[in-house]
Image (spheres, rainbow, N blue to C red):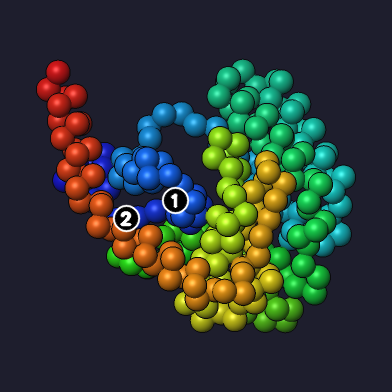
Amino acid sequence: MNRLLRSTPRISVNKLAEYMQASARRRRSIIIDQIRPSTAIVIRYDEASRALVRFYRDPDRSTSRLLTAASELRDKAALIPDAHASQCYLASARAIEAFVPISDRIRPKGLIAVASPKSGAHLKLGGVSISVAPDVSLLEPGTERRVGAMKFHFPRTSKLSTESLQYVATLLYTHLESVGDTPRKGHCYGIDVFSETFETAPRALKDRMKNLEAACEEIAERWSKLYESVAGNLGAEAAE
């Protein structure tokens, strides 16, 4: 097996949500990108993610603290000599600033917000392993029981539609339920930061899950053939 390639079907929750609303050409591209992850240097939004998680963990933290965090990142970007790191700091600052207008509209009352563990947050569906990895978990006070979760989407070049965000929220709900938690639809959020939009899990959850399962079956069916195609192209490139 080529170590650069993934032989078994897998996809992230946000990419699957994008896949659900994508054109046929884009769907093929998404699968190929999952088979052969890009080695290109990309903009990362780690600092923005940490700032938003801190915002939800502290119920007394105001939106002004978010703006302060963005300002501090801009200062770091101006001082750091590493060009890529500087771009990442600036991108995170812009993301935080974009999030401010909707921040208080998605602040569940009476729940405890904590950072979610990233490991083990997978859901199997239609022969595909979906990396769910919520950013924030919402707990019932006095318990460890999760009743909700949040997932942020940062990239500006692949914004998620309303329908796609509902699919994100649907997968969050289903993941929590699958591990024994007691999620509530209104507390599972898919959030597109730069679009300043968010959605919760819809009422027609079963229909959404049927659509997602069908999409995953399609991904699993196409994976082997596209894997062979990508591997063949890699071999041809190596031979040149």
| 123, above or below 142, in the image | above
Q: Which residue is mark 1?
A: 19
Marks 1 and 2: CB-CB under 8 Å? yes
Residue at x-position 44% and y-position 58%: 131
Q: Residues within 10 Å of mark 2 (few under 14, many from 20)?
A: many
| Residue furthest out toward the left | 239
Quick one: SS at disc 2?
Answer: helix
* Percent of width and height locating residue 157: 56, 35
Left or right: where 39 falls relative to 239: right
| 218, above or below 124, in the image | above
Residue at x-position 17% and y-position 43%: 228
The label shown at residue 133 is: none
* Percent of width and height locating residue 92: 67, 36
Q: Residues within 10 Å of mark 1 (few under 14, many from 20)?
A: many
Q: Which residue is mark 2?
A: 219
Residue at x-position 14% and y-position 18%: 240
